[in-house]
Amino acid sequence: MRAISPITVLILFFGMLAPAKPKQMLAAGLIAASMDPLGVWIAHLRGLATPTLLNTFAMFYPNYVCAVLAVAPSRVLHRLGRHIREARALGSYQLVERLGEGGMGEVWLARHRLLARSAAIKLIRPEMLSDGARELGRFEREAQATAALTSPHTVRLFDFGLTGDGVFYYVMELLHGCDLESLVRKFGPLPPARVMYLISQVCRSLSEAHAMGLIHRDIKPANIYLCRMGLEYDFAKVLDFGLVKRERRDGATSMVSAEMELTGTPGYMAPEAILGHADIDRRVDVYAVGCVAYFLLTGERVFGAANMMTELMRHVQEEPPPPSHGAGLQIPREVDELVLACLRRDPKSRPASAEELLQMASACKTADLWDQEAARKWWEAHLPHLATSAKADTPIWDVGARCDPAEEVDPWTSRFTTLRKTR
């Protein structure tokens, strides 16, 4: 009895492992099964063998049987793959690639199945919805608050919803650029004129939010992206309104994010937020903008410290130094004064809102020294892969990481949450 050809084993294993369609698997299996008979007939043409057609089929018919059998596992694998693709679809968007993850969930690159438009999708872990309808309502209010903002300097929210397995998701615009945290870590402090140029754009985003009674509460360099938008360079986008707080007309505040929670990022939190005051208002964002400006000018946080608690207490207890004391660049006095005005410990002494801060920044003569031509030249020199053309599938987080691939995450600038009892 003739031994079965090793090709039959390869055909069966290929059918069980390769993610091919059944018709493609059948065609590939028949071609592979024909290799043995083809070798015999080549030998016959060279006079080395004299087989008949019937003998050849009798010798190698197991090859063709295995080619047909390989279609069965291929059909199963193909069906499973289709189910997985359907399961990864969120509304009209298809998940493409995971970009990163954090305490709240994951961020994915996605593509609209009909419009061929790429987007970034933030998935909220099911355990974050452990409180059921209350938590779900909170995330929905956050999404609605962000979607209501129309400033071009605020990240756009396209859609949000809940999957069948309890995962809440946001669909956001995909940006091309680099976050300010990575930018400074990679290229060093920015010129004062450029800082005023960027801060003015951040204030335009926050001005709309403040006018609608919304407080961001987590303004920091990592939540501000420097993008190329069309033909515009140095276009700032404010991200992550996930910690937004609503301010009512009577001066009181209501939490859009979770109640009984004091949330922010060490190094960018206002003293009243650190102390857990119940009456915090839009001036906590003004303080954070001052911290961001200080970081952009000097490359350092206002109160650097070896640990989180020390840094927080320094914000509460100490007066900040002027940026010009810690920077190698010449910083105009008017820029020093603007930053220090934002960083006053007493909120009543700060600019009352982002709109007032925007007016102060626009009045600085320094702001006129940076324009689109200067921005374009900088991008062409330092980020040429983004200055020449923006790839449709290049996500904001991937671009940010590529801007500074060697930079490690600073544990003291990650999101910090403290639960506290309230009556």
Image (tube, rainbow, N blue to C red):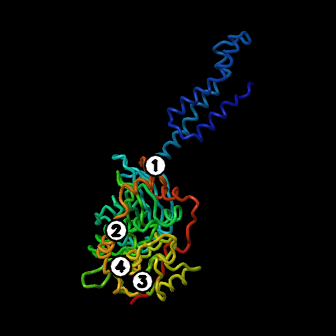
Which label's residue is closer to the chain start, 3 or 1?
Answer: 1
Secondary structure at badge 1 equals helix
2 or 4: mark nearer the eye: 2
Secondary structure at badge 2 equals helix
Mark 3–mark 1 distance (CA, rounded to whole Å)? 44 Å
Q: Are marks 1 and 4 in contact (CB under 8 Å)?
A: no
3 or 1: mark nearer the eye: 3
Return the residue nearer the eye: 352 or 35. 352
Return the residue nearer the eye: 210 or 338. 338
User: What amino acid type is highlighted by mark number 3?
Assistant: Ala
Viewport quadrant of the C terminus: bottom left
Residue 85, numbered label: 1
Q: Residue at x 46, y 49 (%)?
A: 85
Viewport quadrant of the N terminus: top right
Which label's residue is closer to the chain start, 2 or 4?
Answer: 2
User: What amino acid type is highlighted by mark number 4?
Assistant: Met
Residue 184, percent across and down?
Answer: 50, 65
* Dot 3 crowding, Cα within 10 Å, few <14, some 14–19, many 20+: some
The residue wearing badge 3 is 273
The residue wearing badge 4 is 255
The residue wearing badge 2 is 200
Mark 1–mark 4 distance (CA, rounded to whole Å)? 37 Å
